Amino acid sequence: MASEPAEGTTLEVLRRLESGPRGLTDTEAASRLAAFGENTLPDRRTPSWPRRCARALRDPFTAVLLCLGLVSAAVASWGTAVVILALVAVSCVLRASGEHRADRSLAALRELVAGTATVLRRTGPAAQPDPREVPVAELVPGDVLRLGPGDLVPADVRLLRARGLMVQQGALTGESAPVAKRAADDDAPDESRLCFQGSTIASGGATAVVTATGAATRFAAAHRVPDAPRTGGAFDRSVHGISWVLIRFMLLTPPLVLMANATLRDRGLETLPFAVAVAVGLTPEMLPVIVTTCLAKGAAHLARAHAVIVKRLPALHDLGAVDVLCVDKTGTLTQDRPVVEGALDPAGRDDPAVLHWAAVAAWWTLQLAELPAPDALDEALLEAAGPVGEEYDGVDAVPFDPVRRTSAAVVRGGLGQHTVVLTGAAEAVLERCAAAPGERERLLALAAREADAGLRVLAVATADRPAGPRTADARDLAFRGLVTFRDALAPTAAEALRALADRGVAVKVLTGDHPATAARACRDLGLDPGEVRTAAQVADGTGGVDCPGGSVVVARCTPEDKARVVTALRAAGHTVGFLGDGVNDVAALRAADVGIAPRSAVGVARESADVVLADKDLTSIGHAITVGRHASGNIASYLRVTLSSNLGNVVAMLAAGLLLPFLPMLPAQVLAQNLCFDAAQLAFAHDRPGAAALRGPAVLRPRAFLRFALGFGMINALADLATFAVLALALNGPDAVNDEAVFHSAWFTENLLTQAAVMLLLRTGRRDAAGRPPGPVGLAAAALAVVGLLLPPSPLGAALGMTALPAAYYLLQAAVLGLYALALAAARTRHRRRQP
């Protein structure tokens, strides 16, 4: 196993790796490079254009349209076949091109883990080790590295020597604070002696031996996760649910038409083109095109206006359907730096002098200890205290040591006197302070109280001592007090959280940090954390994170915990988005309906995400959710309109086909009607739904859509049958239906007029549209009505077997259409009142 060389004592590790403190020779390194391969992550292959197009055919409606097109070609209905196959081709090309653009944009964001590393190499067995810079790809197990502040850890390593080493490994574990590492062979956990690829050296320095490279590292193990099968998102589940119900009905329709006509009208295979046309009429042929156009248009707007890249087009709809957003704390709700909250004296009262002495210590530690930059706490102290420290003469400084957990600075005081300022963990500082019996316990309780409130605590003590070489090691100091820190809040987080709440999105915080720290950040942002849970509590079934009022914060999360919480939320029926940027977030990114990562995330997180943000900012997610709901609202409008209208037309055609001595419409006329309606519905891709469509998650619920289509489709079928009754009875008696051309023309016109009315009345969220200028859908509906009136008497209408209608027919049709519009408006009002 990859971890075995890192286990055991330092000497045992070196022996297993056949290495030593002086590193490898050039010959040994070359042979190991040939044996183990380069220290690089596996390449993720970009699908080819044919593969992208083939994947688009997995959409159920696209596949069924392809089958219907082939059936139409088989029965020599060439016009129908050409149109259907053209729709299939357009849908595949649009989807493939959208994914290609997303991949091309993402390729510009990929970053290397590191360029070079400092390694000890020897020219021969007897030669002295020579520190040199080598490409990270050429590192091999057994190489000895030197690591300093700011360095990226280029491989998995075991520490040989370390001095004041603090490692930022949040990308792997989710911890916001650097972690102390040590090289000593003692009873400390093995993890404290190991550093992993993807970590960053925050402070201190170390010498380490490489234990694993390339595919054997923990980083690479996480990189392999995206290859696991992924379940479909909310969009895929919704569309597939609607699709398969309609597909079953479509597959049942042609045999029913054939059998009914053969039995009742003695018409057999000659009705097959009509049966295929009826099945095509039931199909929302434009669904793949409308969906792809809406999503591609929204994705292009996000990339252009907000630098948000949508890698997988259906993820944009899933964003619109998100009702739970899971985020980590650091970098999302808070910045990756602390700020001073307050300074307390030993009695717990505010005391600016405590902050002053802590800042003096930070200033002179930075000046005298040769640190490359102040650590996060020192920087916060200097920012809060302003210009301090220069009024003293610095004498000595001892930087923070993770073993002692203190740092010290010595400044010149009175004649022959030095002042020692000690800062660090409360327990470590109090050990060197003079305190009365019981006083130490009281002060530790004070520090614990502040820590339980979600604050980080720095203890401060001072002492005046005679000048001497070991003044910094003085004991019996006077305890001055505590400086408390909180995480700096992200500037836009509070406003973004309010906006998400207004859109019906619940935020869950999954973090590796301390529960109190996470809860404090939530409260500071106006987000009620509820009952904070730890990952262990969630594991035993008491988490309650899947409840609307359940826990907002789950702390001490491992990568597996995050993925498990996300999976539980999805199992409870939520559509879940997850924002993460580290290797520890990969499993959760894959488990969510929508995985979201910032551009600064580690490469594997970006590869696993469906959406990539320019910055780790909740505001960008808010924009993406809004655009997703716009796109979903337009798709919902199309589905409502086309399903109800098509279902009504098919029911009316089936009924008329059994009652009439001739076909109610010729196959070419059915095709022409479908083409006109489909062309008009392309306007839905450019519509802007009203505000009502943005207030809640945009979910396509199959049962709700089918109930809607059935109810409103029956109204449409009644309007069609009323037109049939007018044609049959109101004018010249029952013999009027013997004029096939008049019947076909009148019904063709009536169908297009009712479809235009449906487009206007069943749009999504347009309750506030009164008084506004007609948008693209209004113009398209008007054009559809004009075509319905003008096509039958035109030369093209004559070629399709239609003729001009007497004026009386138009008056009667207007009456039927008016009653239909009133019934449709009344049903729409009743439907909306019943909605939650």
Image (cartoon, grey):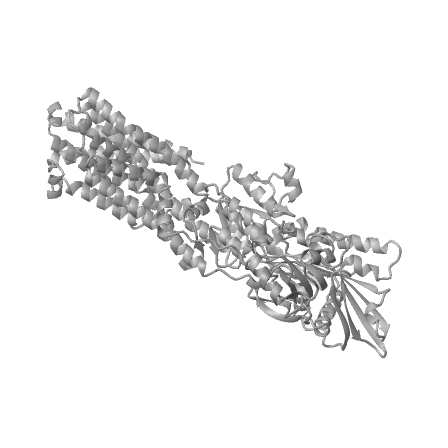
The quarter in which the C terminus is drawn is: top left
532 or 446: nearer the eye?
532
Q: Quadrant of residue 212?
A: bottom right
419 or 723: nearer the eye?
419
Q: Residue furthest right?
A: 437
Is any atom of residue 534 visible in this view? no
Q: Residue 477 location in percent, x, y?
A: 84, 65
Q: What residue is drawn where x is 44% and y is 53%?
A: 45
- Residue 685 left/right relative to 190: left
733 or 815: nearer the eye?
733
Q: Residue furthest top?
A: 263
Q: What residue is drawn where x is 45% and y is 57%?
A: 106
Q: Is residue 742 above or below residue 770?
A: above
Q: Residue 305 location in percent, x, y?
A: 41, 59
- Residue 155 left/right relative to 244: right
Q: Residue 124 location in percent, x, y?
A: 65, 69
Q: Is residue 678 above or below residue 403?
A: above
Q: Quadrant of residue 252?
A: top left
Q: Residue 364 location in percent, x, y?
A: 73, 72
Q: Is residue 460 above or below residue 223?
A: below
- Residue 672 left/right relative to 66: left
Q: What residue is drawn where x is 72% and y is 72%?
A: 369
Q: Quadrant of residue 755?
A: top left
181 or 316: nearer the eye?
181
Is any atom of residue 606 visible in this view? yes
